[in-house]
Image (spheres, rainbow, N blue to C red):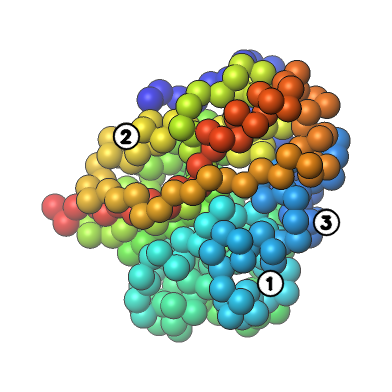
Amino acid sequence: MGKRKGAHEGSVDVKKVVRERYGEIARTSQSCCAPPKGPTCGCGAAPAGISRAVGYSEEELKSLPEGADLGLGCGNPVALASLKRGETVVDLGSGAGIDCFLAAEKVGPAGKVIGVDMTPDMLDKARGNARKGRRKNVEFRLGEIENLPVADASADAVISNCVINLSTDKERVFREVFRVLRPGGRLMVSDIVLKAPLPPAVLESVDAYVGCIAGAALRRQYLAAIRAAGFRDLRVLGETAYPIDLTDGAVRSFLEQVPIGMDELRKVASTIISIKVEAKKPLK
């Protein structure tokens, strides 16, 4: 598939913009940056409402430390991962810690959960949430998902929720996941992919990139990148249209910044899919 590039990358450091936007989310505890900063994943509703809509149960949400749910996901990878007591889990782009805390309940005191995030403000928030919730088997590390601060063959499972789409080098992300997994370890991700290419105006928009749209890969390319990293037994466990509220203020703000009409935006919305994928690292 090659390293993902858009026309904006020559003049704008996308990773820096993503870090700044999600840092603002961490500081304000809102599910999206207010206009005119542009939309992010999960914009348009209260965090708990978004999380329920993408697959979190009421019981799971009530078990979380206050502030751990920012409504940034597009699925519930912990529900898919069949985690066992005593396992080590790595969460890519752990944010305020929602999936880490749910995974910690599954693996128990003998297990360990490592959250990796490149945004210092998010790490501060997640660590504070861990203290509030007295989650002693959860650790948060500063790092990029293309260069995981995790030892080789040390994890039983890697999860991620609507984060890999933000990477400009998804192949490297999946190679890193393969590296840190033990033989027989498994990958479980919820993410955003595309059924068809995006119009140039959207592809070149940094706001669309931060909003998990312009950074998303075509479905076939995304799955091919997982296989190319060495994974086997790849299965798509589910895929649904990703809801975009075309009346939402963040969407209207986006329309003001990107030269695209409402009819074209509807076409774009119809190509966006929330996908749930599992794959395994071979035993040999």
- Residue at 59% x, 55% y is 73
Residue 40 image position (x, y, % from top left): 70, 43
Graded by Cα atoms within 10 Å as few (under 14), some (14 to 19) or many (20 or more), the crowding at tag 1 reads many
* 77 sits left or right of 142 in the view: left
| Location of residue 232 with respect to 141 vertically, above or below | above
Q: Please give the residue where the numbered disc 2 appears in the rendered image.
A: 224
What amino acid does circle 3 point to?
Thr
Q: Callout 2, which amino acid?
A: Ala
CB under 8 Å between discs 2 and 1? no
- 180 and 91: which is toward the camera: 91
Q: Is residue 115 above or below residue 162?
A: below
Between discs 3 and 1, the one toward the N terminus: 3
Query: Marks 3 and 1: which is nearer the front?
Result: 3
| Residue 194, percent from left and from top | 49, 34
Separation of marks 3 and 1 at Cα, in angstroms = 15 Å
Kindly identify which residue carries mark 1.
Answer: 129
